[in-house]
Image (cartoon, grey):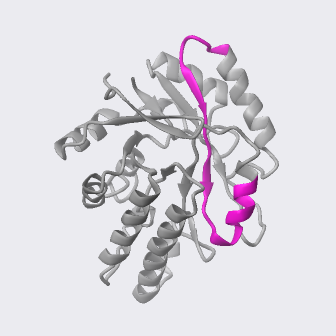
Amino acid sequence: MITSYHTHTTFSDGDNTVSEMVKAAVNARIGEIGISDHYVMPPDGRNVSWSMRLDGLPDYFNAIKEAQDAFTGKINVRYGLEADFFSETADQLRETLSQYAFDYVIGSIHFINGFPIDEHKKNWDNLTQPERNDVIRDYWNRMLQLAKSGLFDIVGHMDLYKKFGAQPTIDVSEDIIAALDAIAEAGIAVELNTSGWYKPIREAYPSAMIVKGCIKRGIPIIITADTHRIADISRDFKRGRALLESMGYTKQIIFKNRKMSMVEHQED
């Protein structure tokens, strides 16, 4: 079974509707697709342009249900979400998530103290190297909190800060180890996000070193495309699978009702 769980539609910053995304998945012979639009609840209460409206979940669920009904028997359609983690609004997010029957929730970090880590290279260029170090170290500390929050089923693009090439000049290995240990203890999965190969860094999320750390700890890994258009719905899945297999990882996981299950390894 081929799965594609990290997909964005016109409910957030995707180019295609839910129905168009599901139809593309059927045409691509994908066995299971999850819709996972952005849902961002920042502490300052502002609207984030690339997120769905905070009151948009009822319409979102209805659209997924319609696509599910329209393609019954052709593909499994899962209710997903990519929600940003902020410690300040974690309880509010928990209450919101509890009101809907999600199959899985991807937890991501796009902001550190209001700093947009993947918006534009110039944002990083405007920081001094010590300031970059602080952002990256804080990122890993937030990742640890994300894992401990109990809010999520999958960790999204784990080292996203590297998108434009930003790297620390201090040793953050202990911070990364602490985050990975928390993820393992929480029993949640990490995605191998192939979209990183098409960003300025030209490297999947997370790095091979971090993937090895996940495998060492028994953390489940799922290949995703982080697609924002139907053409990329399974982009570089073969390459991602080859990378994982080169490290000895051959498992595949699926989600339903926020429960993780192992299935036969995906084949094209």
Foreground of the two, 224 or 79: 79
- Which residue shows up at 47% across the image and 69% down it? 144
Q: In the picture shown, does residue 242 fall above or below 70?
A: below
Q: Where is residue 153 in the image (x, y as percent from the top left)?
A: 52, 48
Quadrant of residue 45 within the rendered picture: bottom right
Looking at the image, the residue that sits furthest to the top is: 73
- Which residue shows up at 61% across the image and 77% down it? 113
Tell me if I can see residue 178 in this picture.
yes
Magenta region includes residue 80: yes
If the image is split into quadrants, where does the C terminus sit?
top left
If the image is split into quadrants, where does the N terminus sit?
top left
76 on left or right of 177: right
229 on left or right of 212: right
239 on left or right of 100: left
- Which residue shows up at 23% across the image and 38% down it? 242
Q: In the picture shown, does residue 175 fall above or below 181?
A: below
Quadrant of residue 44 within the rendered picture: bottom right
Which residues fall within the magenta stretch? 70-95
Foreground of the two, 180 or 63: 180
Quadrant of residue 167 within the rendered picture: bottom left
Q: Position of residue 21 (x, y in %)?
A: 58, 28
Magenta region includes residue 262: no
Image label count: 0
Foreground of the two, 163 or 145: 145
- Which residue shows up at 38% across the image and 48% down it? 198
Q: Position of residue 212 (x, y in %)?
A: 24, 56
